[in-house]
Image (spheres, rainbow, N blue to C red):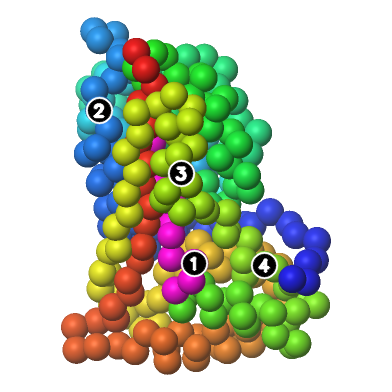
Amino acid sequence: MHSVESAAPTWDPQQYLRHSGHRARPFLDLLARIPRLPAGDRPARIADLGCGPGNVTALLADRWADAHITGFDLSPEMLERADKDWAGTTRGGGWIDFRPADAAHWTPDEPYDLIVSNAALQWVPNHPESFASWIDGLRPGGTFAFQVPGNFVSPSHALLGELCDTPEWRDRLGDQGRRFVHVLDTADYLNRLIGLGCEADVWETTYCQLLQGEDPVLDWVKGTALRPVLTALDDDREAADAFLGQYRALLREAYPPGPHGTVFPFRRIFAVARKPA
């Protein structure tokens, strides 16, 4: 695979939140499987790795009303939006704050009852190598839980990688269309977490999402998988428009609109690992 020097993707919270309902649903499904935390009568301490604009971080306060929750993210744009919308005292008397951190290098600086990550670890190369330190940072009986996309062979993502690798774009974009492919299969996640001494629950779900509007799949990936490409072409509006035009045509063929909208199946992988008490 051809490789070019890569800048960190620039994130757009407003674009990401255009599909906030569909993006939040897997996180709610993940939360539903998290067991009782070891906090007892004291407020739980929770970390959210790759918190993005903070909208799902805030959902943690609905489950653990008095918890102290910290969201960590590498994007200044996402942290600014999260801090503006969600930081401060929660309705249950807890607290939410946000801090800059790169999940690739983050280690717990205090004991946590729960470390959670929603649709972020796919951007972190070798993230399973960090599982041991994250689990070590849990209190006895604490939980590490995450959800990652598992749809990288689907047309939306496969076509992006293939287009980046065409002669027209290869030298300019290299592997920008595959920057996010750092996900294991469910069995590998299960074996790694059990091997670290945890009681693990790993599963997958394919959401049959019905999207509305013109070119809704393109609109979806503009908020996530397409960010590295858009960042790489940020200084050349003409090239960006040309790439989007070609990618749009491919997506329209792969995901034609139906009578009720555009069906966009999306597979996701979930894991909940409980540290022994």
Mark sitting earlier along the chain (2/4): 2
Instruction: Measure the C-alpha gap from mark 2 to mark 1.
Output: 30 Å
Amino acid at the residue labelled 4: Gln
Instruction: Measure the C-alpha gap from mark 3 to mark 1.
Output: 17 Å
Q: How many marks?
A: 4
Magenta span has 50?
A: no
Q: Which quadrant holds the N terminus?
A: bottom right
Q: Nearer the viewer, mark 4 or mark 3?
A: 3
Per the rendering, the mark at residue 97 is none
Q: Which of marks 3 and 1 is in front?
A: 3
Instruction: Measure the C-alpha gap from mark 4 to mark 3.
Output: 25 Å
Per the rendering, the mark at residue 176 is 4
Mark sitting earlier along the chain (2/3): 2
Mark sitting earlier along the chain (2/1): 2
Q: Can residue 213 be seen in this view?
A: yes
Q: Disc 3 designates what residue? A: 189
Q: Residues within 10 Å of mark 4 (few under 14, many from 20)?
A: many
Q: Nearer the viewer, mark 1 or mark 4?
A: 1
- Provide the residue span drawn in magenta: 145-154
Instruction: Measure the C-alpha gap from mark 2 to mark 4.
Output: 38 Å
Q: Which residue lies furthest to the top in this view?
A: 41
Q: Disc 1 designates what residue? A: 152
6 vs 96, nearest the viewer: 6
Say left or right for 225 vs 47: right
